[in-house]
Image (cartoon, coloured by chain):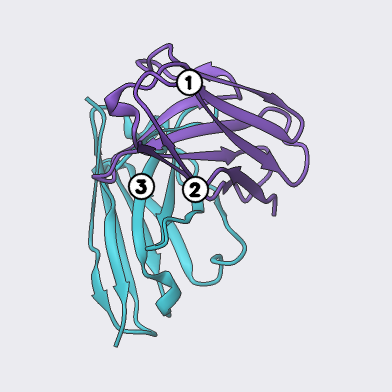
Amino acid sequence: EVQLVESGGGLVQPGASLKLSCVASGFTFSDYWMSWVRQTPGKTMEWIGDIKYDGSYTNYAPSLKNRFTISRDNAKSTLYLQMSNVRSEDTATYYCTRVNYGRLMDAWGQGASVTVSS
Amino acid sequence: DIQMTQTPSSMPASLGKRVTISCRASQGISNYLSWYQQKPDGTIKPLIYYTSNLQSGVPSRFSGSGSGTGYSLTISSLEPEDFAMYYCQQYDSSPWTFGGGTKLELK
C-alpha cells in the first residue's frame, strides 16, 4: 500500500524557518517525481513545487520560489520542504504527493498543519 | 498563471441525483485537467486525469469531459460517500493551478 506521512508541522513565528518531512512507503520512491501542495484555512489549494525522481531538478510556483526549497533523500525515501522567512499567509495544511508518469498527483499524504503566528 | 474557475462553489443534492461540476480555464489547457476528491477528514484522492480518464479504483459513476478551456465532472447517481469537496487542476502550464473547489452537500 502506498503511504505518504508528513511531519514537522506546528506553530511557528513570523520570519522563522521550518522544515517539513514526508516519509514514503509502499513504492520505489526513487522512481517518482514528488510534489508539495498546500491548502489554506479557506480551502484554497496551491501547488508549491515538485522535484525530479533523482533530485536533479526542481520546479516551483514563482510566488514561493525565493522562500521554499524542495529536496529529497532517496536512501531514506523522504521528501522535504524547507520553508524560510514564513509569513501569516503560509498558514496552511501541507500535503506531500506522488506524481505519476502522466503528471497526475496520484497519492497524497494526510497533511501537516502549519500555523504562522506570534 | 492559468486561472481555474470552478462552479458552483457549493451544491446541495440528493442521493441518486446526477450532478455536474464545471471548471473553466483562463486559456486553453489541451485536456491536461485532473479532478480530485477531498473527504471531510482531509483525505484527498485523484478521480480523473487527462480530462476523462478514470483513475484506477474510481467508480464508473464518475466521468469527465471537456476541451479547450471548459471541463466538467459528472457523477451519474450520488452515493453517500460522494458528499465531499471536489477540485479541478490544470497541468498544462506551470505553475499547476487548482479551481476554488466545489462542496457537494447532502440536501
Which badge, 2 or 3, is on the more N-terminal residue? 2
Q: Which mark's residue is nearer the viewer, 1 or 3?
A: 1
Q: Which residue is mark 1?
A: B18
Front residue of A25 and B18 = B18
Using the numbered discs, state the Cα–Cα distance from disc 2 to disc 3 in whole angstroms.
10 Å
Q: Chain of mark 2?
A: A
Dot 3: within a 10 Å radius of its alpha carbon, few (fewer than 14), some, or many (20 or more) residues? Answer: many
Question: Of all residues shown, which one is farthest toward the bottom?
Answer: A118
SS at mark 3? Answer: strand
Per the image, label 1 sits on a secondary structure element best described as: loop
Residue type highlighted by circle 1: Arg
- Residue drawn 38% across and 22% down? B78
Q: Residues within 10 Å of mark 2 (few under 14, many from 20)?
A: many
Label at residue A96: 3
Tint of chain A: cyan
Q: Which residue is mark 2?
A: A50
Q: How many marks?
A: 3
Q: Give the residue type at disc 2.
A: Asp
Indicate the chain on which mark 3 is placed: A
Q: Position of residue A43 (x, y in %)?
A: 42, 56
Point 40% across, 69% down: residue: A83
Q: Nearer the viewer, mark 2 or mark 3?
A: 3
Q: Amino acid at mark 3?
A: Cys
Q: Position of residue A28 (x, y in %)?
A: 31, 28
Q: Nearer the viewer, residue A101 or A12?
A: A12
- The correct choice, above or below, for B101 with respect to A114 in the image is above
Direction from residue A61 to residue B11 in the image, left or right: left
Q: Nearer the viewer, residue A110 or B9?
A: B9
Query: Badge 1 sits on which subunit?
Result: B
Q: Is residue B31 visible?
A: yes
- The colour with which the image depicts chain B is purple
